[in-house]
Amino acid sequence: MNPRQRRGVLLMTVAVVGAAAVFVMVLGYVNQVRSEVGRMTGVLQLQSEVEPFQPIQDGMLRRVQVPEKYLPATFIADPAEIQGKVAASVLPKGAYLQQGMLSDAPDLKPGQREIAITIDAETGVAGKVYPGAIVDVYATFSGGNSASCAVRVLNRVQIIDVGQLRTEQGKEAGGGGATVVPVTFALDPDATLSLTYAESFAGKVRLALVGGQSDAKPPTNQLCKTPKAAR
């Protein structure tokens, strides 16, 4: 073996030893990271945004692996846990599902419609309504050239769910945000139509908690004030 061949063999030997040393170092680093991170487990992550009270379908989810040591017990890993559940509030894309994000889907009686509206948290509910509460729904309409009215839209209806507070941007350009809360009812078709009309066209929609099993006297359902120009 001539000197040039010996140098080649030496260089190859050094390269092999260096590669082996790098492999051992990388393997040691990986094992160290694994020991620090610990066991991995699968959790459910949303692939799209989910609106309040919308059921979460299998196609909206994917399973991702995350370190088990960093997960609280409330994270959901089993798709069976979301069966019969709906989103309790707006759930953003990419969120990991937790138990507090979901609520039971309401049971509807034959002919009932489930409908959710957003109520101004300050003037409408002030944090005092809850699922199962009995309320009246009031709406105010500004007159213009016709009468301005305050109307009892619904009498003694039951709330089936209350969502989480959120900020809703004003419709006007540069308008500030209002704090609102989604409130869900189960209503017959006529009451559903009345509530939809009030939410769409009323200046304000308010809830009033109702006490007792019945009203002592029939309540006034409408109060209107005719503008002077129309008299």
Image (cartoon, helix red, strand yellow):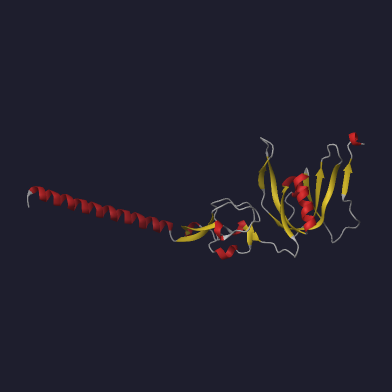
Vertical relation: 145 (above or below) 91: above
In this view, the residue in front, 198 or 130, is 198
Residue 215 appears at what percent x and percent y?
88, 58
In this view, the residue in front, 152 or 214, is 152
Count of labels in the image: 0
The image quadrant where one finds the C terminus is top right
Q: Is residue 144 left or right of residue 82?
A: right
Residue at 40% x, 58% y is 35
Q: Is residue 134 visible?
A: no
Residue 58 appears at what percent x and percent y?
56, 60
Q: Is residue 14 visible?
A: yes
Residue at 57% x, 58% y is 98
Instruction: In the displayed orientation, state which residue is furthest to the right.
Output: 231
Residue 163 appears at what percent x and percent y?
68, 53
Instruction: In the displayed orientation, state which residue is furthest to the top.
Output: 229
In this view, the residue in front, 212 or 190, is 190
Q: Is residue 24 left or right of residue 103?
A: left
Q: Quadrant of residue 46?
A: bottom right
Q: Quadrant of residue 73?
A: bottom right
Residue 154 appears at what percent x and percent y?
81, 54
Residue at 74% x, 54% y is 129
